[in-house]
Image (cartoon, rainbow, N blue to C red):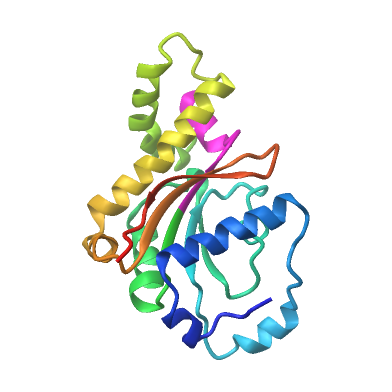
Amino acid sequence: MKYHTAETQATMTPAKALQFLKDGNQRFINNLNANHDLLKQVNSYKDGQFPFAIILGCMDSRTTVEHIFDQGLGDVFSVRIAGNIVNDDILGSLEYACKITGSKLILVLGHSKCGATYGACSGTKVGHLTQLLDKFQSSIDKVKLHYPDTQMTDNTFVDAVSHQNVLQSMREIMAKSPVLKEMIEAGEIGLVGAFYNLETGVVEFMDEQIRIL
């Protein structure tokens, strides 16, 4: 498996970074995972790291992005939080990855049967979790327009909210981070949404905001 270096990162583009993830998911679902010599990667990256992408995903234990996209140590940044929501600390992490470290792609990854989404749809109120789940309300409101007669805890409704929440997180990144917005509009980095199916392992890519220069 090819290791990422300062030289390969310098020639990386958002489109290439996205293709790396698409190819990795294809290997994952076909059980053709690349041979990652993890100990060699530990030694290769002891003095620095050159991740080609940063993935904002859910904390769900079934959605480990290095496995889903068949990546090794040092290949991608992984930011995980319940419901892949956006806050100031998440934005700071994304800015660090792209502006400081040189990652070329931000991928926002939602998934099916998300517990955080279900909690928001069912009105769960528990300590600090309540404030986090409140961030789903705009996505819930949008889905209600399309599924007015569907129970909010139905799998169809919950997964639709999770899809919409990916798009909401992408909108918040553009609206709340001038640093990232400028880089995306200049074509320096890409912003892409994706949805992982827990039953099949397949990642559906959507709303690919990559400007080809």
What residue appears at the point 73 percent right and 73 percent down from the top-left corner?
36
Magenta residue span: 108-125
- Give residue 176's position: percent from left, percent from top: 24, 54
Q: Quadrant of the N terminus?
A: bottom right
User: Residue 29: x percent and y percent?
Assistant: 71, 49
Q: Quadrant of the C terminus?
A: bottom left
Tell me if residue 125 can be seen: no
Name the spot of residue 185 as percent of width and height, x first. 24, 60
Q: Tell me the residue at 68%/45% (across/down).
A: 201
Is residue 37 covered in magenta? no
> Viewer-proximal residue, 19 or 173?
19
Which of these two is toward me, 171 or 153?
A: 171
Outermost residue on the top side: it is 149
In the image, taking residue 98 as reference, residue 50 lies left or right, namely right
When asked about the image quadrant of residue 103, the answer is: bottom left
Locate residue 37, reporting x and y percent: 75, 78
Does 74 sit above or below residue 71?
below
Which is nearer the eye, 44 or 25? 25
Q: Return the residue found at the far bottom.
A: 47
**169, 90: nearer the viewer:** 169
Q: Residue at x 22, y 64 (%)?
A: 182
Q: Is residue 209 above or below residue 10?
A: above
Please report the residue visible at 54 percent of the width from the left and 68 percent of the height from the top. 76
The reply to whether residue 86 is visible in this rendering is yes
- Residue 68 sits in which quadrant? bottom right
